[in-house]
Image (tube, rainbow, N blue to C red):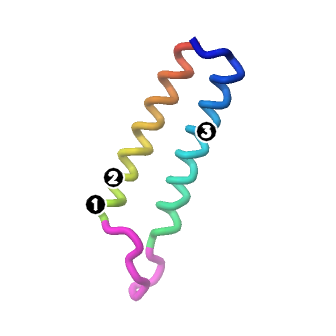
Amino acid sequence: MLRPERRSKVVAKLTNARCEIEDALKLSITVARYDPVVMTEPIRKRLVAIIEELKGVLTEIEGSQ
């Protein structure tokens, strides 16, 4: 079992990682028709899957408290 303060740090790091990935996805959206593509659609889908996986991990960690 993780000590409560250690668990909080792990949850905070994973939450920050999820937020950073979400921010990167938002920044990669092309605004104008002629904007360059920063991330291809397959990469964007992989990142969305990673975000969902992180959400599941966080739920699991928080549920085991």
Helix or strand or loop: what does disc 3 sit on?
helix
Q: Which residue is mark 3?
A: 13
- Numbered range of the magenta stretch: 30-40
Pointer 3 or 2: first along the chain: 3
Circle 3 packing at 10 Å, graded few (<14), some (14-19), many (20+), is few
- Whether 34 is among the magenta residues is yes
Q: CA distance from mark 1 to mark 2?
A: 6 Å
Q: Residue at x 61, y 39 (%)?
A: 13
Tag 2 secondary structure: helix
Q: Position of residue 58 (x, y in %)?
A: 51, 29
- Whole-angstrom CA distance, mark 3 to mark 2, is 20 Å
- Name the magenta segment's main secondary structure: loop
Label 3 and label 1: CA atoms lie apart by 26 Å
Dot 1: element: helix
Within the magenta stretch, is there residue 3? no
Q: Quadrant of the N terminus?
A: top right
Residue situated in front as seen by the camera: 32 or 37: 37
In the image, what residue type sits under mark 1?
Answer: Pro
Residue drawn at point x = 53 percent, y = 17 percent: 63
Earlier sequence position, callout 3 versus callout 1: 3
Q: Quadrant of residue 7?
A: top right
Badge 1 vs badge 2, beta-carbon distance below 8 Å: yes
Query: Is residue 35 shown above or below 6?
Result: below
